[in-house]
Amino acid sequence: MTDFLAVIVGDFYARMLVLLLSATQWTIYLSLTAFVGGGLIGLAMTLLRIAPVKWARLFSAAYIWTFQSVPLLMLLFLIGLGMPAFFKVNVPPWAAATTALTLFTSAYMSEVWRGAIQSVPAGQWEAGRVLGLTFAQSLRYVVSPQAIKIAIPPTVGFMVQIIKGTSLAYIIDFNDLMRWGKKIGNSQLDGAEPFVVFPIVAAIYFLLCYPLTVLSRRLERRSGGEKLMVAAKGVNVGG
Amino acid sequence: MNFWDCGVDLDGKSGKICVDIRGMSKWFGSFRVLNNIDIAVSAGEKVVICGPSGSGKSTLIRCMNSLEQFQSGSVTVCGVALEQDGTNAAVQRRVGMVFQQFNLFPHLTVLENCTLALRLVLKLNADEAEARAREYLSRVRILEQANKYPADISGGQQQRVAIARALAMEPELMLFDEPTSALDPEVVHEVLETMTDLAATGMTMICVTHEMGFARQIADRVVFMDEGAILEVAPPPEFFGSPQNERCRVFLSRILN
Ligand SMILES: Nc1ncnc2c1ncn2[C@@H]1O[C@H](COP(=O)(O)OP(=O)(O)OP(=O)(O)O)[C@@H](O)[C@H]1O
Ligand SMILES: [Mg+2]
């Protein structure tokens, strides 16, 4: 790949680009791990949040509240720098970065999903109950299919926030796109000045995020259109 | 079936008590919504409940299928004594309910709306469930819409689907909470006709409604509620002809013209 790029942009820039792109891998891995891990924990928290058991709701509310109130950068500091210093344990940057982003993602996702579930009219739960469905059956067959439609656009949209959020992990020496961009920018080599490198880094972030933004907007327009259609015909307004 | 054996008389009323509520009260916080309610409904009987907005009609019938909890007195439905402050899934299975807002499941077709609980709750297999759902959809004369989504049919049709969905569970008691108040005036009659047909089958029905023509036609007794209490209970001729309670008289004169 370096050879191929060298033909187009010259040897120096080709090597720089390959370096940046391989660092981008780590940005992608970190984003995916945070998305999947955060999604799973977020799902569990969502279920606890709406469960007909009081302590479960309280626990989940406390969890969401905690990790939503702490800035991501603070989480990274606490886990990546605070924990090693305080408990004298070795926390590798990738472990700290994944943990912080997963916690951050899970709190946000469960809040989005809870909102989606609660936006399904109460009458749907009641209709399930009077037909003899259990809480779990109503959730699974009646409420979730409607909530998922509402939740997909903001969920995809939040992936953009995760990708951008990973750029903060450079602060705890995680070797992602941002950190390599900064390294190269600070290298004092001719042609690798920050004003050259950072626009390239920004462009790579843009290429990662833009398709997701477009997708999220498109999904939003689609589900919005459906909602309008349903409302216009007077189905299930209120409960 | 031989009706001598099952104790059902020709009117479809057996004298068996289906709903028995005694001295029941309910509070929302410190606000007493239902005040010392006493009423018994026999199997096969049709009761219409009316009263001003906020008088507790919905709350009362929601206590009959355990959608709301009560705090004192006793409520027995289909032979099951409900616990104070409890929820009873067994009763919910035996009582059907139709809501003002239909509450059809918008992501499922008309047919799927009817088969969902048949499969999940009654554990029928796909064929049995579909056959039974079709039978009830044709009873409410809407079988031809079976594969449409709720959003694609009219309000009156949606409400009839909701009735079929409840009936398919073959409940012992049907509760209706203002089933026609969310409908355009020109389709109200189609839902009332469906309910009149249902009444003729001997189903026990308790309907909150202000459709007084319907009440006159099908009700065995009409109940007037105000401020959480039952103030008048009488068969339609007495209820409309010579109501004893003053507030009931005022209410009737207001809604009858
Ligand atoms: N969940 C609730 N919490 C607190 N108060 C409630 C709740 N539900 C109903 N109420 C109150 O209880 C009273 C009775 O309500 P209910 O819905 O049973 O009246 P209704 O006779 O059905 O009225 P409508 O004709 O408007 O449907 C009203 O004053 C209402 O504001
Ligand atoms: Mg009401």
Image (cartoon, coloured by chain):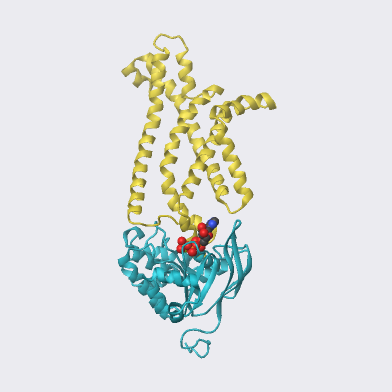
Residue A18, x across and y down, in percent: 41, 21
Q: What color is chain B drawn in?
A: cyan
Looking at the image, can residue B128 be seen? no
Q: In the picture, one chain is yellow; tell me its letter.
A: A
**Residue, x 52% and y 36% (percent of image)?**
A105
Residue B225, x across and y down, in percent: 51, 69
**Residue, x 41% and y 78% (percent of image)?**
B216
Q: Where does the C terminus of chain B fall, quadrant-wise?
A: bottom left
Q: Quadrant of residue B249?
A: bottom left
Residue B215, x across and y down, in percent: 42, 75
Q: Residue A30 versus residue B157: which sits nearer the camera? A: B157
Is A88 on the left or on the right of B94, as rendered?
right
Q: Residue A99 versus residue B189: which sits nearer the camera? A: B189
Q: Residue furthest right?
A: A87
Looking at the image, can residue A48 be seen? yes
**Residue, x 57% and y 27% (percent of image)?**
A74
Is B226 on the left or on the right of A231, as rendered?
right
Q: Quadrant of residue A157?
A: top left
Is residue B147 depicted above or below B243 in this figure?
above
